[in-house]
């Protein structure tokens, strides 16, 4: 299979606890190379635009508040089957359901404050990468 790229966010609950290095180590150990990375502090409006697909969900406002509550680290990860591999390394959305050894099992605090986001399909990966990075910032 060809190399694939996926989009990742290390969320405020994790940056606040200085878990960025430990989380990136999990990506790299799984064969996911960081080809772009930036630490930024989103506004609530920017978080809301990123998560617009969840606009009608009851947790949308809480999610946007949380994502704007502290810095995030936005990254592009590259590797064989990167989208599925990243989802495997992250574990289930709810840390209570996440397999042992996954990022969410080890670090997440709740379903809302679950340490990482990862794209769920090639189409969303392309849109999410383009929201945060220009082509010139992707360095393979
Ligand atoms: P993420 O993969 O970033 O995609 C959408 C996010 O919504 C998800 O991770 C969770 O952090 C959040 N989310 C999903 N379900 C709930 C919930 N029941 N309550 C609060 N946040 C949620």
Image (spheres, rainbow, N blue to C red):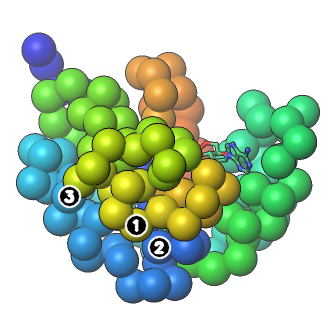
Q: Of label 3 and label 1, which has the lower sequence position? A: 3
Which residue in the rendered view is the most extreme toward the top?
1
Q: Residues within 10 Å of mark 3 (few under 14, many from 20)?
A: some
In space, the residues marked 2 and 3 are separated at their CA atoms by 14 Å
Q: Which residue corresponds to the image point at 34% horizontal and 74% vertical from the top-left?
A: 20
Confirm or deny contact between disc 2 and disc 1 (CB under 8 A): yes
The N terminus: image quadrant: top left
In space, the residues marked 3 and 1 are separated at their CA atoms by 12 Å
Q: Position of residue 48 (x, y in %)?
A: 79, 51
In space, the residues marked 2 and 1 are separated at their CA atoms by 7 Å
Q: Which residue corresponds to the image point at 60% horizontal and 59% vertical from the top-left?
A: 110
Give the residue pinned by disc 3: 26
Mark 3 vs ligand 1: CB below 8 Å: no
- Helix, strand or loop for disc 3: helix
Q: Nearer the viewer, residue 26 or 105?
A: 105
Give the residue pinned by disc 2: 14
Q: Position of residue 54 (x, y in %)?
A: 78, 36
Give the residue pinned by disc 1: 107
Q: Position of residue 40 (x, y in %)?
A: 55, 73
Drawn side of residue 123 relative to residue 98, left or right: right
In the rendered image, the vertical position of residue 116 relative to residue 78, given as above or below: below
């Amino acid at each position: 299979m060809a190399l694939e790229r996926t989009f990742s966010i290390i969320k405020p609950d994790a940056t606040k606890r200085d878990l960025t290095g430990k989380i990136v180590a999990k990506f790299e150990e799984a064969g996911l190379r960081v080809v772009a990375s930036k630490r930024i502090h989103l506004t609530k409006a920017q978080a809301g635009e990123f998560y617009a697909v969840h606009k009608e969900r009851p947790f949308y406002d809480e999610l946007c508040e949380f994502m704007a509550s502290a810095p995030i680290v936005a990254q592009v990860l590259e590797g064989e089957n990167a989208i599925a591999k990243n989802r495997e390394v992250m574990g289930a959305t709810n840390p209570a359901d996440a397999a042992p050894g996954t990022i969410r099992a080890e670090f997440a605090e709740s379903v809302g404050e679950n340490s990482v986001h990862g794209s769920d399909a090639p189409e969303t990966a392309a849109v999410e990468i383009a929201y945060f990075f220009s082509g010139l910032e992707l360095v393979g």
